[in-house]
């Protein structure tokens, strides 16, 4: 499929998986690549329009079953994330937050009525979801969240705020996590409920082709049936994050591949000192090292995807994938920028855009340090979180 596939990993994919990948790649080529540099520069993206197009192809919640979802394999979903992020991390985030966080939370923890109300429209891209866990003062430590939900008769009253919430400015439903007297609980909150306001965060230097917002909850009154009945304790939102991180394991490799393919093309066509850049030993050493790391990342992603499809993927294994693949993808993007020289910072090439985006991917849905602690606890049996 690509000269970067030094280990013939492509042969390990099924024909159906390759076909799904090809469909998503064509979509990204036709719909994202011609416009994404402008979206990034302007800090705007036609998210609702894209969501409807993604919904027509079955990409939203594609690894879920029923309610209009495609029921694809975990590997197929991963390959879709890779192709989407080869276009832009923000585009992949739109799909990932919609399907693996908001839709998954309702699908896994919601009532049948909640599933029927939201999931078919979300799968079609007609309704947009967001996932409200991170707060202004509580990112890596969600257990200390300040958002509260209290009972008032049969209703719930929510107060608090959420920050850095993808899709929030245009969301129709927010999966909001709050502390109650019984512990952490999740709520499916229509975003037009009185007391809910969403403010778009501007002036970002990363993920500029993604809509990010702050959600304020001011005495938001919700009926009893807004609570996700099966979401009990902090393990519920953390389980959603594990689901979403699997897509990131693959997605980061898409950004890295796009950087590598750009650098390869540039190195073979750019002439300096009477020869192409690719003819210099230092350039070949850079390309070889990056290609090796990319292939190792692909093997890791594929292994985790097969474990997920077998129903045996565990959270610490996803932490291994997220830690390694995002860290290596960012290193690849930075190194590819050196091959392009000054052109590496130009918006005419995607490398700096990917590098900037990966700075966010490195820290969202679990910083590298958090994943190191997850792996460290697995190795030692000792928690270092507190």
Image (cartoon, grey):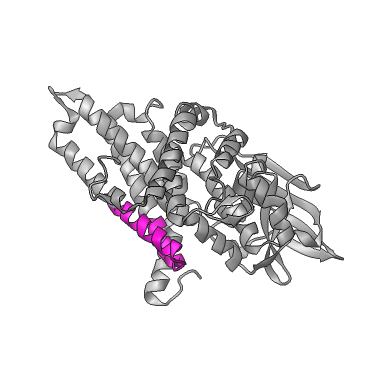
Q: Which corner quadrant holds the N terminus?
A: top left
State the image coordinates of residue 372 (x, y, percent, origin top left): 40, 63
Answer with left or right where residue 78 lies relative to residue 59. Answer: left
| Image quadrant where residue 333 sits | top left
Give yes or no for residue 50 being in the magenta stretch.
Answer: no
Above or below, 182 against 139 in this view is below
State the image coordinates of residue 243 (x, y, percent, origin top left): 51, 58
124 or 169, which lies in front? Answer: 124
State the image coordinates of residue 139 (x, y, percent, origin top left): 56, 56
Residue extending farthest to the right is: 153
Q: Range of the magenta residues? A: 296-324
Answer with left or right where residue 1 lies relative to residue 94. Answer: left
Above or below, 147 against 33 in this view is below
Give yes or no for residue 297 being in the magenta stretch.
Answer: yes
28 or 293, which lies in front? Answer: 28
Q: Is residue 16 in view from this perspective?
A: yes
Above or below, 229 against 293 in this view is below
Residue extending farthest to the bottom is: 381
Residue pictured at 20% horizontal, 44% vertical: 288
Answer with left or right where residue 262 lies relative to residue 145. Answer: left
State the image coordinates of residue 75 (x, y, percent, origin top left): 42, 54
Q: Main secondary structure of the magenta part?
A: helix
Residue pictured at 41% horizontal, 53% vertical: 249
Q: How many marks?
A: 0
Residue pictured at 69% horizontal, 48% vertical: 173
Q: Is residue 367 in view from this perspective?
A: no
């Amino acid at each position: 499929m690509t000269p970067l596939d030094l280990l013939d990993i492509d042969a390990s994919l099924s024909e159906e998986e390759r076909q799904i990948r090809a469909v998503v790649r064509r979509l990204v080529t036709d719909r994202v690549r011609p416009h994404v540099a402008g979206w990034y520069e302007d800090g705007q993206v036609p998210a609702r329009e894209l969501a409807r197009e993604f919904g027509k192809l079955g990409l939203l919640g594609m690894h879920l079953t029923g309610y209009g979802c495609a029921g694809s394999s975990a590997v197929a979903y991963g390959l879709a994330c890779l192709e989407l992020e080869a276009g832009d991390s923000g585009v992949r985030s739109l799909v990932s937050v919609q399907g693996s966080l908001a839709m998954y939370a309702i699908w896994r923890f919601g009532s049948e009525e909640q599933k029927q109300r939201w999931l078919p429209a979300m799968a079609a891209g007609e309704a947009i979801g967001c996932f409200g866990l991170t707060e202004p003062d509580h990112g890596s430590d969600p257990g200390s969240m300040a958002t509260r939900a209290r009972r008032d008769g049969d209703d719930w009253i929510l107060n608090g705020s959420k920050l850095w919430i993808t899709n929030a400015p245009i969301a129709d439903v927010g999966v909001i996590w709050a502390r109650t007297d019984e512990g952490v609980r999740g709520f499916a909150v229509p975003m037009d409920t009185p007391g809910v306001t969403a403010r778009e965060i501007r002036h970002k230097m990363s993920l500029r082709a993604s809509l990010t917002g702050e959600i304020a909850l001011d005495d938001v009154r919700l009926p009893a049936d807004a609570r996700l009945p099966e979401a009990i304790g902090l393990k519920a939102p953390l389980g959603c994050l594990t689901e979403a991180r699997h897509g990131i394991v693959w997605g980061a490799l898409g950004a890295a591949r796009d950087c590598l393919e750009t650098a390869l093309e540039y190195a073979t066509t750019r002439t300096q000192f009477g020869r192409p850049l690719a003819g210099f030993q230092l350039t070949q050493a850079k390309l070889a090292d990056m290609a090796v790391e990319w292939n190792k990342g692909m093997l890791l992603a594929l292994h985790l995807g097969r474990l997920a499809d077998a129903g045996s993927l565990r959270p610490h294994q996803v932490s291994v994938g997220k830690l390694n693949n995002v860290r290596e993808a960012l290193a690849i993007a930075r190194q590819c920028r050196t091959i392009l020289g000054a052109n590496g910072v130009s918006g005419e090439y995607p490398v700096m855009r990917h590098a900037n985006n990966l700075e966010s991917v490195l820290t969202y849905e679990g910083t590298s340090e958090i994943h190191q602690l997850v792996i460290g606890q697995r190795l030692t049996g000792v928690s270092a979180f507190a």
